[in-house]
Image (cartoon, grey):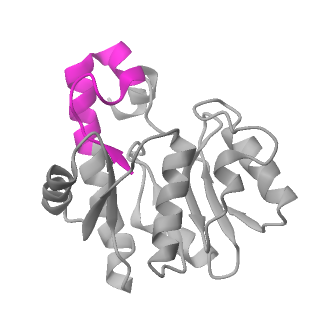
Amino acid sequence: MARWPAPGRCKRRLALGVGARRAAAIQARLTAHTLAVAKLGWQPLGGEVVLAVSGLGSRAARHWAGSLGADRSVLQGAGSLGMRMGRQLRRAQCEGSRRIVLIGTDLPQLGAADLEAAFQALETQELVLGPSEDGGYWLIGLRRAQPLLFAGDQAAIGWGSARVLEQTLAIAQRQGLEVALLPRRRDLDRAADLEPWR
């Protein structure tokens, strides 16, 4: 899942510290990195790499996805992050996917082994999460769509808050879903997150 890297339209929290143009350039590099890793980690095993795009029309999204080596593109559509992720999972399931992994484009440490581990976990678990240092997650994988993980069954998940992982795990437990956790990672949202990469 990626937002078109245009200044002022992506990485707004990062832009507060480094400026809109630099934030957009970082977004572009992270997106290219993520797609390259996805191709290495899943495509050789027969999977499809789909770029879910926000901030572009369908024609431009297809061109961008092709330039990055994705198999195809889809539009994320409107709504909260949870609504957009849930939509992508339902789409993939309707198309016949049995193991679906969603990743964002803000993890410089992402490697092919991470995706391989996620798909391996889905052989035996119903849900896999990659926890992030900020209380969210950098990866979610499912064998079938689970709408309550994105809307919550009693209250909406606080997307963008430090409680996203905690709330998601609580819903998973209430739904009886077995969860596999990948290693905790730091995603790149704010200027301070750039320190290890300077």
Please indicate whether residue 7 sits to the left or right of residue 143 in the image. left
Magenta span? 1-29
Residue 46 lies, with reference to residue 85, above or below; the image says below
Q: Position of residue 171 (x, y in %)?
A: 79, 52
Residue 38 lies, with reference to residue 161, above or below; the image says below
Quadrant assignment, res 3: top left
Q: Position of residue 25 (x, y in %)?
A: 21, 33
* Residue 116 seen from this side: no
> In what quadrant of the picture does the C terminus appear?
top left
Between residues 157 and 45, which one lies in front from this camera angle? 157
Residue at image x 24%, y 30%?
Answer: 24
- Judged from this view, the residue extending furthest toward the bottom is 46
- Does the magenta run of residues contain 7? yes
Between residues 62 and 70, which one lies in front from this camera angle? 62
Residue at image x 33%, y 19%?
Answer: 15
Please indicate whether residue 147 sits to the left or right of residue 3 in the image. right
Residue at image x 37%, y 23%?
Answer: 12
* Residue 32 seen from this side: yes
Q: Position of residue 166 (x, y in %)?
A: 75, 42
- Does the magenta run of residues contain 137? no
Residue at image x 63%, y 82%?
Answer: 123
